[in-house]
Each structure stands twice: as structure tokens, then as C-alpha cells.
Image: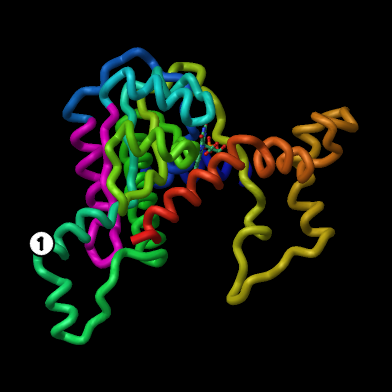
Amino acid sequence: MDACWYARIGAMNETLGVILNRKSTRQFLAKTIPEETKSDVIGATLQAPTAGNLMLYSIIEVNEQAAKDTLAVSCDHQPFIARAPWVLLFLADYQRWFDYFEFCGTGDFARRAGLPVRNPAEGDLVLACCDALIAAQTAVIAAESCGLGSCYIGDIMENYETHRDLFKLPRYTFPICLLCLGYPTKAQKARRPTSRFDREFIVFQDTYRRLAESELEKMFEKEQARAFKNRDELDGAVNVGQLIYRRKFAAGFTMEMNRSVKAILKQWEDG
Ligand SMILES: Cc1cc2nc3c(=O)[nH]c(=O)nc-3n(C[C@H](O)[C@H](O)[C@H](O)COP(=O)(O)O)c2cc1C
């Protein structure tokens, strides 16, 4: 969509304006966030839709500077995490419900009632991840509406053992994302929102549509021109696919993320 569309929609609808103006913020003013603002953001976050109204997530506010410093290293060396005034860890969480089930004697109850006796499993985990991410995105938009910028840190899924020990994570939790929040610097505020792929490649009607090679080429045309400018090669890559394969898909941090997530899944499975 062009800049005029953004401006027109933003002027017409305040909520859409907040959504369209948001961009990830990685530089924050050293300005304290009032407790009242934090409380408003958390209040809005807890009203996020949640599967079965179960609230299958927890939020840990990371207050200790030492913990932020650790995260700045363990989450793929991103120093801005240590400088974020407000850091929220979102956990997919079945532990609370599982503890409550045990407290309520659901094991005996299930046996008597002929119901399966079981522990949280893969489907429960994915559902809890949905809950946690929807809550996180609600926090992002709520924060944005209060003038706070934010940035997701997906690298929290790496180095599971470090994060488990740091936050005392029990078995049926999964650290799905971290949010860094704070008032954006002037430069961050002035930055234009980043562009997205055209909707024709993302939104389908009725059934899934595999993109033809010509469509894939068209989809990445702008990014190819932007990333490569007048160069034939970048980091040994000749197109965006090769570049992203090297920088993201086959990068060390992604390999670590896959190792770490396997370790978390094993912990859920080995009941
Ligand atoms: C699941 C997820 C994980 C992300 N992880 C990181 C991260 O570790 N570090 C970072 O700087 N940005 C991270 N981001 C932010 C993205 O890079 C950013 O959303 C994307 O480049 C689009 O830019 P925008 O948010 O400014 O529109 C993450 C975003 C999402 C949704």
C-alpha cells in the first residue's frame, strides 16, 4: 500500500492508525515508564482472546538488570535488550492448569469416569503458544497506543537451559517470546514503517495456492532491488533466497533455536 493509503486510513480510524504506524523499536529513551501506564498495558493484555478462556500463558516482568544483561547475550547477542526499560517474557503455560488438575484430584476422577488420564501434550502446547503470542501482540498494540515502542525477541527460544534456570521455568512452560518496551528515541519515531509483501502473495481465496516461479520472482522483486542495489553478489549470494538462507535459515542462531526447542519439547514429552 502506498503512503497516501497509510495516511488516509490512519486519519480515519485511530486504532488502525496505531497499528499502521507501529514499527519495531530498538532504541529507547532513558525515560521511566509510569507504573500506571504499565498497569494499563498489562490490563489490556489480559483481556486478549484466550482459548477456552483458560489463559494458557504467564508473563514474567524482567526487572533485574543482571537478568537483562544475560538475555542480551543469550538471545543471540542483542545488546539493546539490556537497555530496554521494560522487558516482558511471555510463556506458554500449562503448568498452572496441570497443578490445578492435580489439586482437584482429576487423576482419580478421570479413571472413575472412564476419561483418558494424561499429561499436557503437543496440541496443548501449540494452543498455549497461541494464547501467549496473542497476549504479546495485544501488549504491543496497547503499548503503542500509550506511546511506547516495542520489539519482539524470538531468540528467547534459544539457550533453553539458561532461560529455564534464570526464570525457574517448570516443565510445562515454553518461553515463546520476549518483548522489549520503552519510549522510542526521536530517530526511531521518525522511521517509516517497514514494507510488506503484496497481499496477492499472502491472502488466498478459499484454498491454498502454491506460487508459480514467476510469482515468486515477482514477490521478491522489490526486496532484490533494495538489498542488492547495483551489486551482483552480497555475502556470496546472488538473490534474496540465498541471502536469507545464509543469514537466517542456516545461521548459527537458527540452528541453536532448533536445538533448544527440541530440548523443551523433550521435557514436555518425557512425562
Ligand atoms: C516472532 C518474532 C520474533 C522477532 N525476533 C526479533 C529479534 O530477536 N530481534 C529483533 O531485533 N527483532 C525481532 N523481531 C522483529 C522483526 O524483525 C520485525 O517485526 C520485522 O523486521 C518487521 O519490522 P517491523 O516490526 O518494524 O514492522 C521479531 C518479530 C517477531 C514477530
Q: Residue furthest front?
A: 270
Vertical arrangement, residue 52 with respect to residue 188, above or below: below
For this rendering, which residue is in front, 172 or 208? 172
Vertical arrangement, residue 58 with respect to residue 26, above or below: below
For this rendering, which residue is in front, 13 or 197? 197
Q: Look at 80% across and 64% down and name the residue there.
A: 212
Vertical arrangement, residue 89 with respect to residue 55, above or below: above
Residue 83 in the image, given as x and y percentages of width and height: 40, 18
Q: Is residue 244 left or right of residue 22?
A: right
Instruction: Name the residue beneath numbered marker 1.
Output: 103
Residue 124 in the image, given as x and y percentages of width and height: 35, 64
Corner quadrant of residue 162: top left
Asked if residue 113 shows in the view, the reply is yes
For this rendering, which residue is in front, 10 or 213? 213
Q: Residue furthest left?
A: 104
Residue 93 in the image, given as x and y percentages of width and height: 29, 52
Residue 250 in the image, given as x and y percentages of width and height: 69, 42
Residue 45 sits inside the magenta stretch: yes
SS category of the residue bearing label 1: helix
Amino acid at pointer 1: Phe
Which colour scheme appears in the figure? rainbow
Q: Look at 38% across and 15% down and name the residue there.
A: 29
Q: Look at 48% across and 24% down and name the residue there.
A: 73
Q: Look at 62% across and 59% down and name the residue there.
A: 202
Q: Residue furthest bottom?
A: 114
Q: Judge the density around disc 1: few (<14), some (14-19), many (≥20) Cα neighbours within 10 Å.
A: few
**Magenta region: which residues?**
38-62
